[in-house]
Image (tube, coloured by chain):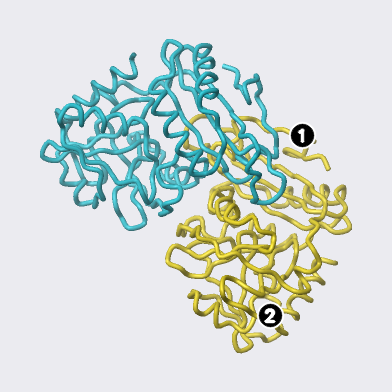
Chain colours: A yellow, B cyan
Amino acid sequence: MESWVDGLPADVLSLKDRGLAYGDGVFETIAVRGGRPLLLARHLQRLENGCRRLALKVDPVALSIELEAYALRLGDGVLKLIVTRGDSLRGYATDPSAPVRRILQGNPPPAYPAAHAEQGVHLFPCTVRLSEQPLLAGLKHLNRLEQVLARAEWTDAQYTEGLMLDASGRVIEGVFSNLFLVRDGALITADLSRCGVAGVMRAELLFQAESLGIATDITDIPLEQLHQADEVFVCNSVYGVWPVRACGSARWSVGPLTRKLQTLARALLDA
Amino acid sequence: MESWVDGLPADVLSLKDRGLAYGDGVFETIAVRGGRPLLLARHLQRLENGCRRLALKVDPVALSIELEAYALRLGDGVLKLIVTRGDSLRGYATDPSAPVRRILQGNPPPAYPAAHAEQGVHLFPCTVRLSEQPLLAGLKHLNRLEQVLARAEWTDAQYTEGLMLDASGRVIEGVFSNLFLVRDGALITADLSRCGVAGVMRAELLFQAESLGIATDITDIPLEQLHQADEVFVCNSVYGVWPVRACGSARWSVGPLTRKLQTLARALLDA
């Protein structure tokens, strides 16, 4: 589907855009089903948080209306929203009064093999470490070279995702997913206050688990703890939940809590 | 002056460019005088190094010819070259055979007050710290949100540049400059193997200083060492050398080694 820039059809962007020059912006990747953007409130919440922390001025109400209008035309697929600080004059200095630029792109639904969800996936143990920057941690900003380098570490199709650690060796996330582990019935995921992207599906699963009385723990995860987990899964707001079967020498079976949360995620994404 | 994309006049860019999506690319900011790109060999050397480390395929000879052709039309000013990984299909995965995209932009010479070079500048002590990522350290890549956030810390025109430390509190650089200090006649600058941008003027000044028999030291610099320096200056390949007179509570006079290197830089940029 055609893209929109600031609400108008366009397939190109000003060369002066600060998104290009500095990665000065944030983005959201939103599943669209039957013309509806799914988990929209959570996507907008994260976007607003990112814009506030980067001092990007967005109008969330107008943005929400625009997203819904675009999704209606897209029908089924994936909507990518990029918000940048607009055109640069020169240098890093920002104009606090400048309006942001909104870019909407639509793609067909991704064709992931059904086996990823059914039998589970293998993670490639990436050697690229996530650097620690509390000012950017959790945000889905446009500075993603670490993910590009990590994703380039494997070409073997047996690996669906990669495992990323931080500079201190803590387990953080996948390259394009968040990661959960299950131990003694509790759901554990990484603290993302130093690095990582706080995913919308991660937030939703934590919320749903708490509603169901499942213990949740957002904490630092040493690699040994991952190896000792009863279950491991990755998630994002497009594919839902994939059980993780292997990473390096570690092996896991697909467990009941993973299946329960996978069913919840599927219900959200098939809505 | 009009911009070029892949050698052709253009003022817009494909919305699918990975420079926008992920900051997946590198750039150079090159002073142009009398139609000649200055310090071109050093700019190309850094660009090639960045492209090699990010696995971006550039043809340095063709690029050099293109830069020279563009500079000839620009006459006097600043040429910005951006090299991105071109259009994205979807997701972080790269196509190793894909050609890069070359973007050339021309601007008039910057109008910095002469006082910056003559009397020196005051640095704002930025609270934004540079995160440590050895895989990206030294490169002039497009992931520059830390610089954007740091530059947004001050609006008071008494500050010309900002001082940036790393996460461990070491002195690294300015927001758009490298930083040197002088102590007992030796020239000292930060080791940039964990973070920072290895500037072209920094490299040239180190080279020239060594040729003149001046002792140089590329090392970790604690903040106390900066405060105890005899002289401090910042540099880049557009403005040359500016003496630093103050940062926070610290004060320095403009010293002889700063003036000597400033004269050398001026000769390079007035060429």
Quadrant of image for the C terminus of chain A: bottom right
**Secondary structure category for the residue under label 2:** helix
State whether residue A225 appears in this view: yes
B98 lies above or below A56: above
Image coordinates of residue A131 in percent, x first then y, are 46, 57
Q: Position of residue A193 (x, y in %)?
A: 50, 65
Identify residue for label 1: A10
At x 68% / y 63%, what residue is drawn? A160
**Against A183, is A156 above or below?**
above
Asked whether the viewer can see residue B128, the reply is no
Kindly identify which numbered label has been placed on residue A256: none
Label 2: chain letter: A
Label 2: which residue?
Answer: A209
Residue under the image location 82 percent in, 72 percent down: A267
Residue B237 place in picture, x, y as percent: 37, 27
> Quadrant location of the N terminus of chain A?
top right
